[in-house]
Amino acid sequence: MAIKTASSWFSPRLDQEVAFARWGHWGDPVLVFPTAGGDAHEIERMGLIGALWPLIETGRVKIYSCDSVAGRALAAKVGSQAHRCWLLDRFEEYVAHEVIPAIHADCANQPIPVIAAGASIGAFKALAVTCRYPNLFRAAIGLSGTYDLEALFGFTGDNHFYYASPLAFLPNLEGPPLAALRTRFILMAGGEGRWEDPSEAWRMAQILGAKSVPNRVDTWGKEWDHDWPTWHAMLPGYLEELAGGG
C-alpha cells in the first residue's frame, strides 16, 4: 500500500478538531470527499484507495481526504436548519483556507490547482468547492451526485446555504469568478441502478451549460447502483483521464 500520513487540527472555522489524511508519494493532488457520514479514512476502509492504487503507486496522483463535518450534521439533522446551513458554508471555507494550504504545503509549497472528487454528498462538496473557488480547483468529479440539497433537506431562504450551493449561486455568478470557472471542468457520472437519480446531474449540467462552464454527464446504465463498487469502477478511469498527464 502507498505511504499514508494522517493528522488532525482544530479548525477555528468549524470550532472542532478535524482529521486529514494523505495516500501516496507524489503526483497530481486529488481531494476526495467522504459520503455524508464518513470521515477522512472512509475511502480507505471502503476500498476506494485500493481501487486507485495503480495510479497512486505510479505517481500519477496523491489522494487526500478530510472528515465530512457538514455531511454528518446534515445526515443526522444536528441543531437547527440555520446551524446546518452555517456549517455547510463554513465547511467549504475550511476546505479553501485550511485544507488546500495543507495540500500545497505537502506539495513542496507549490500552489497546484487540485482535483476535487466525491460520491453522493461528497460529489456535492466536490462540485461546490470547485464552483466557489475555481482559483483553487482545476476540475471536479462527482459520482452519483446528490446536488439538490434544498429539496433533500428542505433548506429555504438561508444566506449561508445560498453561498454553499451551486444550484443557488451559479445562476447569478458573473465577472471574474465566472471567467475563472469557465476555465475549469466539471464531470458528473452515475448509474441508473438502485438508489440512483441521474436527473440531478442533468439539472446541474443545464445550469453549468447556461453559464458556459465546461461539463460532461456520463450515465453508466442500470447495472450500476448508488454504492461503493460503482465508485471503485468509476473514479480510477476518470482520474486516468484528468490527472498525471492524462
Image: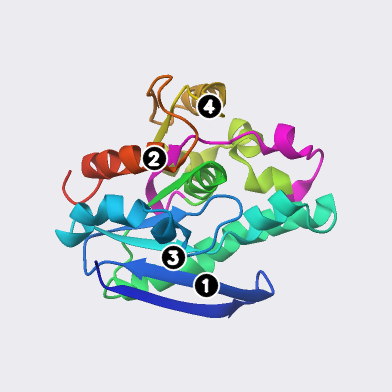
The residues bearing labels 3 and 4 have C-alpha atoms spaced at a distance of 34 Å
The residues bearing labels 3 and 2 have C-alpha atoms spaced at a distance of 28 Å
User: In the rendered image, which residue does mark 3 sit on?
Assistant: 100
Label 1 environment density (alpha carbons within 10 Å; few <14, some 14–19, many ≥20): some
Q: In this view, does 93 lie to the left or right of 157?
A: left
Question: From the viewer's perspective, is the residue at label 3 or at label 4 nearer?
Answer: 4
Residue 74 place in picture, x, y as percent: 71, 51
Residue 22 visible? The answer is yes
Label 2 environment density (alpha carbons within 10 Å; few <14, some 14–19, many ≥20): some
Q: Are marks 3 and 4 in contact (CB under 8 Å)?
A: no
Q: If the image is split into quadrants, where does the C terminus sit?
A: top left
The residues bearing labels 1 and 4 have C-alpha atoms spaced at a distance of 31 Å
Label 3 environment density (alpha carbons within 10 Å; few <14, some 14–19, many ≥20): many
Question: From the viewer's perspective, is the residue at label 1 or at label 4 nearer?
Answer: 4
Residue at 66% over, 47% down = 163
What amino acid does circle 4 point to? Arg
Residue 44 place in picture, x, y as percent: 39, 60
User: In the rendered image, which residue does mark 2 sit on?
Assistant: 229
User: In the rendered image, which residue does mark 1 sit on?
Assistant: 19
Question: Which comes before the other along the chain, label 3 or label 4?
Answer: 3
Q: Do the residues labelled 1 and 4 touch (CB within 8 Å)?
A: no
